[in-house]
Image (cartoon, rainbow, N blue to C red):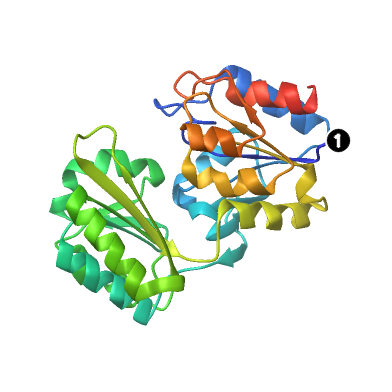
């Protein structure tokens, strides 16, 4: 198979924990681009937390942000696709999280809004965007009612808080929202939850990107390391999971890499194996 497009996850794949990109990955991307194969990004980050990464590897075309909910040109000149929670759905989400009171981070208008309850977790959340706004109360922020809607919500709390809120959101928003919860490995007995509008995933983003670049999804190679990468693994013709990826994520990929995301080098390895570059 002569693959025609490469789509990369950011955190734990392209960007290491210290925020840098391995030199081998950087050089491999430039070699691949020199052959005429475009490179793009598919990430859970907001655009404000993604564009500098795209620029650092020379990506100028569309980027898939917030797990495919926002597809926007790397220079921000054109927004191709936006899917948010708005109106009654946003109001319901606000009501549920206000009742269970986890620390909340509201992704809205390309910034992250939080309050004092979320302060301990802000250093972790800021990887999604450098545009953080600390407000008196997240629940009172006008973004909930803004016509642009809420791009996503990240909540952090005890397992009981998150599990109960997740169950209620699923029951009340049903097919209108995507909800996922997970243990926060760096904090014992702490759980996280991501909520965003249903219908967009990294898989739908790969399908959109393939059409944009004039190839089939079978001609796309993707690289990632986490559960939000599984939809693009299931869509693309060839998929690489980083060494540290959870076992279910590895099983969803066609290939597993020997490189760990903390050290880097996985993107270069994937490019060598898929493109022979």
Residue pushed farthest bottom?
88
Front residue (pair 229, 109): 229
Image quarter where the C terminus lies is: top right
Which quarter of the figure has residue 31? top right
On the image, the x and y values in percent for residue 75 come to 60, 51
Judged left or right of residue 168, residue 20 is right
Q: How many marks?
A: 1
For the point 58% across and 49% down, the residue is 231
**Above or below for 76 versus 55:** below
Which quarter of the figure has residue 229? top right
**Above or below for 64 versus 251:** below
Judged left or right of residue 66, residue 275 is right
Q: Which residue in the structure is indicated by mark 1?
A: 2
Q: Is residue 276 visible?
A: yes
Front residue (pair 240, 94): 240
On the image, the x and y values in percent for residue 259 come to 55, 19
**Above or below for 276 versus 43:** above
**Above or below for 183 versus 209:** above
For the point 48% across and 18% down, the residue is 263
Secondary structure at badge 1 equals loop
For the point 49% across and 66% down, the residue is 198
Image quarter where the N terminus lies is: top right
On the image, the x and y values in percent for residue 236 come to 70, 45
On the image, the x and y values in percent for residue 67 come to 51, 53
For the point 83% across and 31% down, the residue is 35
């Amino acid at each position: 198979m002569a693959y025609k497009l490469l789509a990369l996850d950011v955190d734990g794949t392209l960007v290491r924990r210290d925020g840098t990109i391995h030199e081998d990955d950087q050089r491999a991307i430039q070699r691949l681009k020199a052959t005429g194969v475009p490179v793009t990004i598919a990430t859970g980050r907001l655009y404000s937390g993604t564009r500098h990464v795209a620029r650092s590897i020379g990506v100028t075309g569309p980027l898939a942000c917030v797990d495919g909910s926002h597809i926007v040109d790397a220079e921000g000149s054109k927004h191709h696709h936006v899917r948010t929670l708005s109106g009654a759905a946003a109001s319901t989400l606000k009501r549920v999280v206000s009742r269970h009171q986890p620390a909340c981070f509201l992704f809205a208008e390309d910034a992250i809004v939080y309050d004092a309850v979320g302060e301990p977790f802000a250093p972790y959340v800021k990887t999604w965007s450098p545009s953080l706004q600390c407000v008196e109360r997240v629940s009172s922020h006008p973004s909930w009612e803004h016509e642009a809607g809420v791009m996503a919500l990240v909540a952090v709390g005890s397992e009981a808080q998150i599990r109960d809120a997740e169950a209620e959101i699923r029951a009340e928003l049903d097919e209108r929202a995507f909800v996922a919860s997970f243990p926060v490995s760096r904090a014992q007995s702490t759980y996280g939850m991501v909520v965003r509008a249903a219908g967009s995933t990294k898989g739908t983003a790969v399908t959109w990107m393939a059409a944009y670049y004039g190839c089939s999804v079978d001609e796309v190679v993707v690289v990632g390391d986490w559960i939000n990468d599984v939809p693009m693994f299931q869509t693309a013709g060839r998929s690489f999971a980083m060494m540290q990826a959870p076992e279910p994520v590895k099983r969803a990929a066609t290939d597993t890499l020997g490189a760990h995301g903390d050290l880097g080098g996985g993107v270069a390895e994937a490019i060598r194996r898929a493109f022979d570059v």
